[in-house]
Amino acid sequence: MTVDNVLAIDQGTSGTKALVVCPERGLLGAGYAAVTPSYGPGGSVEQDPAQLLDSVLTAGRQALVEAGEPVAAIGLANQGETVLAWDRADGTPLTPAIGWQDRRAEGICQELAEHAARLTGVTGLPLDPYFAAPKLAWLRRHRTRAGVVTTTDAWLVHQLTGAFVTDASTASRTMLLDLDTATWSAEAISRFGLDGEQLPEVVDGAGQFGWTTAFGAELPLTGLLVDQQAALLAEACLDPGDTKCTYGTGAFVLANAGSPARRSGSGLVACIAWQLAGQPVYCLDGQVYTVGSAVRWLVELGVLSGADDLDRLAATVPDAGSVSFVPAFAGLAAPSWRGDVRAAITGLGLDTGPGQLVRALCEGIAAQVVELTDAMAADLGRPIGRLRVDGGLTRSRILMQTQADLLQCPVEVYASPDATALGVAAVARLGLSGGDDLAAALSPAPPAAVYEPAISADAAASRLAGHRDALAQLTGQRS
């Protein structure tokens, strides 16, 4: 019997999910292991590399035990912009992993401000601490000159197989890759003071990247993708203009931009969606840094008992009343790129209760997603006709309905909560077979739910105007 099951591992910010997936029978087994970021002063966000690796091994082994069947290959998705220094000789971490939300490289970005336009032109990325290169430079300046500095995927792959590689989609999130050639840019490397650094080989998303016995029998690692691009793939966003949003720790909106590479004129990120057989497909990307983490903040304050409590509390009131909530706890990302801005709640009154706060948060999240889709429509020259969505917060009916109302288009909830893992399963399957037919590697299913707009375009415009007024006050700009 031919075994075509794959073990797909999604190493994320708050945990690692692993699935054993069969192309015909679907999900056979799943595993999960939590990871705990630590938050400190100055915008510090760190993770323990040993915990990241242990979570990959634990989740993967759990999934295999639950499946009770062998797999033929492994795929690995990663956080993207989280970095660390490590000893290439033996793989020992030399620093904590610096999380993608970490803001301590802000000073390095300020020093390079005069080169920002040129760096964006080369790499497609705005100059911001969100991306890997400023954090890599910060590590070299403030932590260690020893070893190599890379994104976490290169370290995890090395731990599993001994290979020293990163896939093109992840490399395009570093601000060190030439977007047009999909090769490391000597100019960008030099600007960040990283001359002479050993950088991993940039590889396709599907291929043979090494072998590992970490999960039992020796298995090939055949799929690599950054997390949000893996979700874009899983949701079959294969044509230019196809758009998805993942609601996790943050909200991440990506639109397939086809080929060749295009730069954004609207403040969005331009990067590689995936590369197969040396041919990159590009995407436009926008981020809301704090979404699930904003919900967690309300939980820690005692307003919510958990994310599953969102709809219960929101249903206690008809609307947010006069309350506006801009959830910029870690600054504003695309399209404004204001790392100095912080969250604000306005319009509070003595009659404001938990329900209005939750409604206002849902509306604030949805309004920021609309900002991103509007920017994508401007760059692509067409409005989006629907938004495909995934992630834990898609379980909130009120958030999803609010999103459809403000977008004024259908919102389609992906059939599985595990889009990222299923996306990397598809490229792992291609790496195993040597094929390049993405559509054939996917296992599409009807949406779990579809939300249609329930308010008029005028009502949506009015609610969005209120959000823009709150944002203008926060940024010191006139709306």
Image: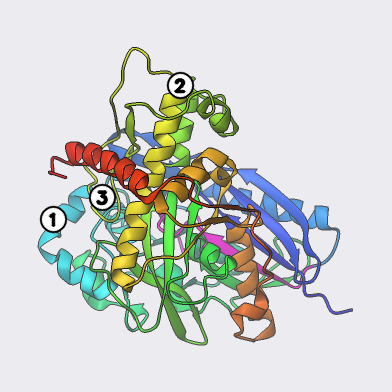
Determine which residue is flagged by label 3.
105
User: Which one is nearer the viewer's eye here, 321 or 80?
Assistant: 321
Residue under numbered circle 1? 111
244 sits to left or right of 149: right
* 80 drawn magenta: yes
Report whether 36 appears left or right of 467: right
Label 2 or label 1, whichever lies nearer to me, is 2
Question: How far apart are the two marked residues, 2 and 1, measured between alpha carbons?
Answer: 42 Å
> In the orientation shown, which residue stands out farthest toward the right?
1
How far apart are the alpha carbons under marks 3 and 2?
Answer: 36 Å
* Whether residue 424 is situated above or below residue 136 in the rendered picture: below
Which residue does the image show at 13% across and 44% down from the upper left?
Answer: 477
Q: Are marks 2 and 1 in contact (CB under 8 Å)?
A: no
Q: Position of residue 438 (x, y in %)?
A: 60, 79
Q: Quadrant of the N terminus?
A: bottom right
User: Which callout, 3 or 2, points at the residue further toward the start of the chain?
Assistant: 3
What label does residue 414 carry, if any?
A: none
